[in-house]
Image: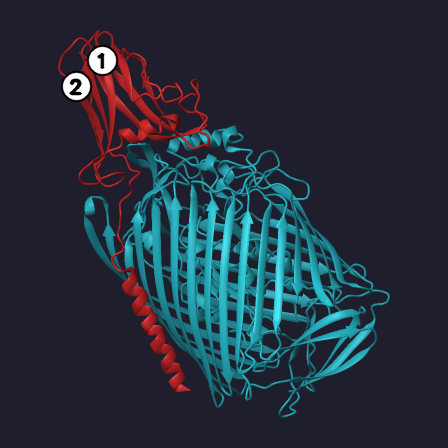
Amino acid sequence: MTMQIKKIFAMFLLLTTVLVSCKKDAHEHNDEEVITTLRVTFAPVGGGNNLVYQYDDADGPGGNQPTKEEIVLQPNKSYNVTLQLLNKTVNPAEDKTDEIRQEGTSHRFYYEPAAGSNITVSGLDNDANGVALGLTSNWVSGAAATGKIKITLRHYGGNPPSKAANDPVNSNKSSTDLEVEFNTKIQ
Amino acid sequence: MLRVILYISVFFVPSSPVMGQECSIRLAGHVEESATGEKLIAATIRIKETGSQVVTDKKGDFVFDGLCPGKYTLVISHIGCESIERKILLDKDLHLDLFLIGIHSDLKEVTVDARRGTRNSGFKKELSERQLEQSRGGTLGDALSKINGVTLLQTGSTISKPVIHGLHSNRILTINNGVRQEGQQWGNEHAPEIDPFIADKLVVIKGVDELRYGSDAIGGVVLVEPKALGTNTTKRTEVNAAFFSNNLQYVLSAVHEQSLRKNPNFRYRIQGTFKKGGNAATPYYRLNNTGSEEKNLSLTAGWKKNNFSTELFYSHFSTRIGIFTGAHIGNLTDLINAIGSDRPADIFLGEKTYQIRRPSQEVAHHLIKSKSILQKKEHRFTLQLAGQLNHRKEFDIVRNPSVTRPQMDLQIFTFSEEIIWEHPKKNNFSGMGGISLSQQVNNYSGRYFIPSYTAFSTGAYYIEKWKKHAWDLQAGVRFDDKRINTTRLKFNSDTISYKFHFTTYAASLFAGYSPDNSWQLYASLAFSSRAPHVNELLSDGIHHGTATYEKGDIGLRPEESLHTTVGIRFNHPEGKFGWDLLGYINRINHFIYQQPQPATPVLTISGAFPLITYRQTDATLRGFDASAWIKPVNNIEWVTRYSFLAARNRTTNDWLIWMPANRLSNEWTWQIPGNGSLTNKYVSLEWLHVMQQNRVPDNSVTKQDYKEPPAAYHLLHFNAGTTIQLFKKPVTIGIGIRNLLNTVYRDYLNSMRYFTDEQGINASIRLKIEL
């Protein structure tokens, strides 16, 4: 009888050891969905040095506070604007911009300058279906002013995404991937 | 003192002995131990079909009166004896001599409460066979919610977990076939990983008996008990099938059990379930990506000889569940928008399919258990070893469809060892003591929410019971020691480690008094304490379901609960009516809860998230469960149940959030008399009224909830069933219609209430075939 118990116990211990040793050091990969950085590059139309401003939260949500730069532009000027998205939680940092471009039919950027900011945004690039995507755009500054601009990336989760040209930023067809409000200054 | 005892025991809903104009048959009998010829006092005889039961008197005699003609199955059980089943055909008065095999020559699995079948000791509520049968094909939570005082915490219609008297998750222990279930039960959208078809009995217990399983069962213990392996050499095969109209869900489950021809001491059972459901429909729209799939398998092998028995059990549970696409929330603004609209966007509605896409979850749970029982003289020793692996994967909506990996991936391994000693029953005393150990390893990959950790716990308990004449006294103590070592992996591979050490105690007292057959009074006092779980200590991340940023508190102390229960039951000696009242006060100090911190939102690249931190307060949960039943005329039974709960945060002098609303239900059952090929015919109608939850935290100072609790609602459910003989095999057919009037409603404890209505009308047909 006790032999029986001993045997069962021995078998169990063996099984335990095997299971524990199998799982040890399971590879802990990071969250590849995370975006830490939104980089906005301004190329002045008609020549001049590029301007780069960014929102940066290098350690992802939580942890250290993110940093946000103020967008400073010259008055009465036109800029070709390009967005770049990075994941800095991995080393080297990963560029996520292409991912958005490839999945353009289920993504869309919105640019919402606050009243009095004296910035107008137009000329957004399109996705494969000819609907606005917004990875590139054209910004025109007016007279000197301070204000804000909100850049929002919306993701269409439906299948098919049913993205349409007149969808508002708060459409219930899409959900928010990014939402960054920059302070702006025209001087 | 010797007294004639005739208990008419009622577990929860008293089932009716069938009565009618031709229902006047008397079934009498006598029970004795087969080897010694000893008259068995207090043996239970239960009629499986009707649920009614009696207990033998001091001469070992029993009697049922007023039975209808028909085929019945009797289940005869007694402390320390093998239960037996006897099928009988009743057309006139009958006398039976029944023999049970005593413990000396055979062994049997007994539950903690050895006086099973006699009156309940304290708070113990069990689903009747009919209730269990009516819930076949649904989730484990659905089945448990038929018990008065048990409600559901839900995420849509496919994920549900039980709430006992307002408490859930880490405060409830689920015991799957004797083993404490160790999964990721801390999450509100993490349902118990158990195939409901494994269960032959579903029992909720509180009080002294829960000490066997842990000192942390502040809310109670749910026992999921399979049928004990039989002892005779017959084969047993049962097939269950069900179909549900609302989500086109079908379920197939089969079990086969037999002994080896060459070695009848060896017996095995194999059981499997397959379940697949499509998108669920509310009265006005169908919700995309709300399908589910479940594949389960279990194997049991047992060997018994003389005074030794051993059993090996393996079960594999796996499920895949779609989460409604329209409830995928990017940030707080999205949540406010979604809540603001009456119905989800059309692109998330209307697909009639079984397909499951992101967001979804996949959970696999393996359990292997070995249990050996040795009977030495009057002592009984049990050794139980168990290993569990729980693997939970959560798939979020991702930008790149070529990503197949889950965004959250949690694996938990648990090994547990338990040794139990039961001393001989002597001088009306019975008792048991035990030691239990467990080792745990938790790993995560993907998004951080809880850290990797190892945990070691050691527990010891002792329970003693004394029962004489009208009195039943019980007492128990337990001690637990838990060590948690975490390796807290954050981004950028910064590793911070923490070590925790918690010591918790529990003690419980119970006194019951039954002056005669009809009355039972009882009171219990229980102290229990629960060490904080890793998610409460160290969670740190965005909770997408509620668009909040959850943060644990490393300084939390164990919760301490003082639980007082008083109860009184009455059953009319002739079975005309009865009632049951249970009142409780649960004072929990250092109660762990989630407190919104509106002043310090967490800024992320997707916007600001409200911060919620785990805090401790002192809480008091007061409530009562009342039920009454009456048979106004023959064959008609009316059962009414009411459950009330008021849960206070004593520190802030406010209500606690997420507590179940009060509810009232009325059920009328007509047991259709008559013989012929159809037996055990019934139809029943249930009217459920759930009130609006008005006891919610004050929203005016700090925003605690985004939406007002939904309005009160009324639901009608219909059930009918019968057993027919097909090719000389009994086939049980059941028909159910949930939400008969296709009522539009939302429930306070369903997190999908922010976005969608509840499921509409759902008709089902169930078949049970015994081969």
> What residue is disc 2 on?
A51
| Colour of the chain lettered A | red
| Colour of the chain lettered B | cyan
Residue toward you, B635 or B101: B101
Tag 2: residue type? Answer: Leu
Residue positioned 24% across, 21% down in the render? A82
> What residue is disc 1 on?
A79
Chain containing the residue with disc 2: A
Q: Secondary structure at mark 2?
A: strand
- Establish if A7 lies above or below A142: below
- Establish if B259 lies above or below B655: below
Q: Is residue B480 visible?
A: yes
Q: Looking at the rendering, in which quadrant would you find the C terminus of chain B?
A: bottom right
Residue A163: name its quadrant: top left
A1 displayed left or right of B645: left
- Establish if B427 lies above or below B318: below
